[in-house]
Amino acid sequence: MNSRSLVMARIRRALADVPRAETPSEVPVDRGYLRVHGDRTTAETVDLLAENLADYRAIVHRTDTPALPALIARLLTDRGATSTVVPPGLPAEWLSAAESVRRIPDTAELTPHDLDAVSSVITGCAVAIAETGTVVLDASADQGRRRITLVPDHHICVIRVPSQVVDSVPQALERLDPARPLTWISGPSATSDIELDRVEGVHGPRTLEVVLVEG
């Protein structure tokens, strides 16, 4: 018996007691799973997000709204960035202190080759999930098109705290529109080869810096 036959035989055994005319909609599914694992305060949820982001090798910074422009300027300077892609709805004040960095608007004319030549990209986010250390982008005006966060080698993502932070994936899904192009990011892009050597920057930026902004 080959593998296909073995799998199909197991499926037939599992469905042996199911009437042929029965449809999935006729069978109630238990949705009583936990929505949140643990009882946390808002501050503890934000701390958990920062911890899990760092565990995924994202670089986490914490600041407040007045200090955000100076922090972004410092991150770009430390990176040696000369240019950054700017989504159309990114707040202008975020880059107000980065006067020496060339701003490249996110337009349809930008090719992957153009984006590969850009130093950095700066975006907001749709929601961040504390329990999984995941940032979700939905291509809103402050995030731009999906490709601008997949090609450049350095991504600075700004998360508003606590309004954009949730505990769990179910809570995040309630905030997201499934019809939008969603990008789920858990740390920098990485994979491992057959020798388990980690390689970063395979299908996204090698460096992800997350800024948690209060206020």
Image (cartoon, grey):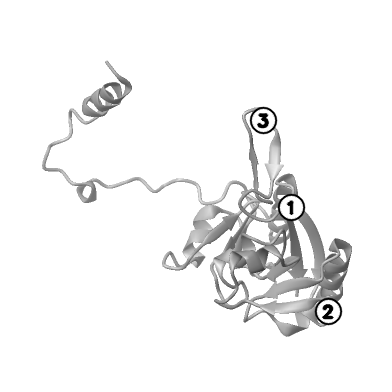
The quadrant where residue 194 appears: top right
- Residue found at x 78% / y 57%: 60
Q: What crowding class fits label 1: few (fewer than 14 Cα within 10 Å), some (14-19), or many (20 or more)?
A: many
- In the rendered image, which quarter contains the N terminus? top left
Q: Which residue is mark 2?
A: 66
- Alpha carbon distance from label 3 to label 1: 20 Å
Q: Which residue is mark 3?
A: 196
Task: State which tag comes first along the sequence, 1 or 2.
Answer: 1
- Secondary structure under tag 3 reads loop
Picture coordinates of residue 127 (x, y %)?
Answer: 59, 64
Q: Nearer the viewer, mark 2 or mark 3?
A: 3
Task: State which tag comes first along the sequence, 2 or 3.
Answer: 2
Picture coordinates of residue 130 (x, y %)?
Answer: 65, 54
Q: Which residue is mark 1?
A: 58
- Secondary structure under tag 1 reads loop
| Residue 152 visible from this viewpoint | yes
- In the rendered image, which quarter contains the C terminus? bottom right
Q: Nearer the viewer, mark 1 or mark 2?
A: 1
- Secondary structure under tag 2 reads loop
> Mark 2: which amino acid?
Pro
Picture coordinates of residue 40 (x, y %)?
Answer: 67, 53
| Residue 165 visible from this viewpoint | no
